[in-house]
Image (tube, rainbow, N blue to C red):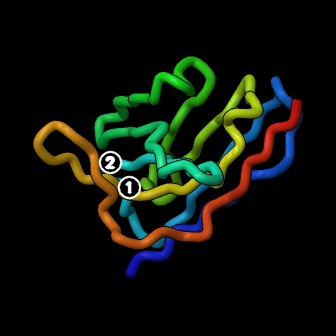
Amino acid sequence: QVRLVESGGGLVQAGGSLRLSCAASGSIFSINAGWYRQAPGKQRELVATITNGGSTNYADSVKGRFTISRDSAKTRVYLQMNSLKPEDTAVYYCNVLRYYRGDYYPLYDYWGQGTQVTVSS
């Protein structure tokens, strides 16, 4: 199985910024990649995606505040988070995505430890 390692989370005040990183071995992000988050008592939510051509898409809840990007070697994916709100508090996970019949799905059926983002008011 491919190991994905998320980092960059932390504690920040509302309105602050964080930059999350996702590291992997090999160019596994060559097609599609995405960031998910899961808050306590909530289901995992896909918040940002990036395709092989660099097209991005965001959940309405983060649109205009978050930016997903990928390095040239396609071995790392980033999530720049600005204007953070308390409701952004969650564990954030990365994954490779497959596109099938109009929707994205995580390629791997396992999840890493993620990185905790806590936003205080």
Left or right, residue 106 beside residue 113: left
Q: Position of residue 71 (x, y in %)?
A: 51, 47
| Number of residues whose C-alpha sits closer than 10 Å to that of mark 2, classed few (under 14), some (14–19) or many (20 or more) | many
Q: Position of residue 35 (x, y in %)?
A: 49, 47
Q: Position of residue 57 (x, y in %)?
A: 39, 29
Q: Quadrant of the N terminus?
A: bottom left
Q: Position of residue 12 (x, y in %)?
A: 86, 39
Residue 17 against residue 83 in the figure, above or below: below
Name the residue located 66 percent from the left edge and 48 percent from the top edge: 90
The residue most toward the bottom is 1
Q: Which mark identifies residue 98?
A: none
Amino acid tagged 2: Asn
Left or right, residue 29 beside residue 99: right
- Taking depth in this image into account, of 55 and 1 the one nearest to the observer is 1
Left or right, residue 34 beside residue 90: left
Q: Which mark identifies residue 29?
A: 1
| Number of residues whose C-alpha sits closer than 10 Å to that of mark 1, classed few (under 14), some (14–19) or many (20 or more) | many
Q: Secondary structure at mark 2?
A: loop
Measured Cα–Cα span from mark 2 to mark 1:
6 Å
* Count of numbered marks: 2
The residue most toward the left is 101
Q: Secondary structure at mark 1?
A: loop
Amino acid tagged 1: Phe
Q: Quadrant of the C terminus?
A: top right
- Taking depth in this image into account, of 32 and 88 the one nearest to the observer is 88
| Residues at circles 2 and 1 in contact by the CB criterion of under 8 Å | yes
The answer to which image quadrant residue 64 occupies is top right
The answer to which image quadrant residue 51 occupies is top left
Residue 8 against residue 111 in the figure, above or below: above
The residue most toward the front is 41
Query: What residue would you read off at disc 2?
Result: 32
